[in-house]
Amino acid sequence: MIAARAGGRRRFLRSLGTAISAVLASSVARAAGAVLPTPRSLAEELSKAIQAGQPLVVMVSLDGCPFCRVARDSYLDPLRRQEHVPVVQVDMGRSTALQTFGGVATSHGEMVKSWKVKIAPTVLFFGPGGKEVAQRLEGGYIADFYGAYLNERMLTARHALKAE
C-alpha cells in the first residue's frame, strides 16, 4: 500500500514538474515577444509580396521601444501569421545592410532616414516600384484604435494594388 502511494506521488510530481516547465517556457516565449523578419533586400521582399497580391508592410522599429513591441506583438505579427501578409521590420539607427527597392546598398538606419521617418513605430505600406500605397501609421499612442487604423490602411493598400 505504501509503495503504491509512493509511485502515485512520483507520477504526480513528474506531471506537476512537466506542467510547470510548460508554463515557464510559454512565459519566456511571451516575454521575448514576436520577431518580424528583417529584410536584406526590399526589392526581393516587395516582389514576393506583389506576387502574393499583397502590399509589403514595413514596420520601422527602435530597440527598447514599448510601443513598437505592442504594435509588433499584438497587430503586425498576427497579421503576418494569420493573414499571410508580408510584414518585415527595419530598425532605426541600425547599420545592418539592406538593399533598397532599386537594389542600391544601404543600411537600415539610412533607409529610415530616406523615408523621413522620425517616430517609432511607423508602419509603411508599399506597392509596385516601392511606392507607398497607403497613409503611414505613425506612433503607438492610439492603442484602442490601432487595429482599426491598421485594417483601414491595409484595405487602402490592397485597393491600390488592384487599381494598378
Image: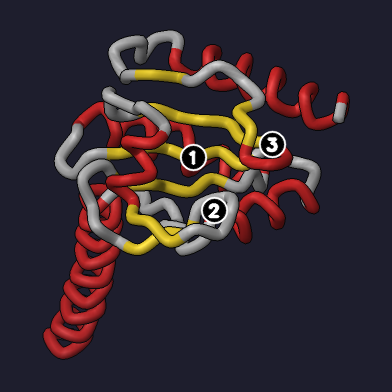
Image coordinates for residue 8, horizontal then vertical, percent: 23, 78
Query: Element at badge 2?
Result: helix
Amino acid under label 3? Answer: Gly
Amino acid on which the number 1 mark rests in the picture? Val
- Residue carrying label 2: 42
Depth check: give the residue in front, 15 or 27.
27
Work out whether residue 71 or residue 48 is closer to the camera in this orientation and state it.
Answer: 48
Disc with the residue nearer the chain's start (1 vs 2):
2
Q: Quadrant of residue 164?
A: top right
Q: Is residue 73 visible?
A: no
Residue linked to disc 3: 127
141 to 73, vertically: above or below = above
| Residue 58: mark | 1
Q: Is residue 43 left or right of residue 12?
A: right
Question: 118 left or right of 138?
Answer: left
Could you give the CA–CA distance between mark 2 and mark 3, rounded to whole angstroms?
Answer: 11 Å
Where the N terminus falls, by quadrant? bottom left
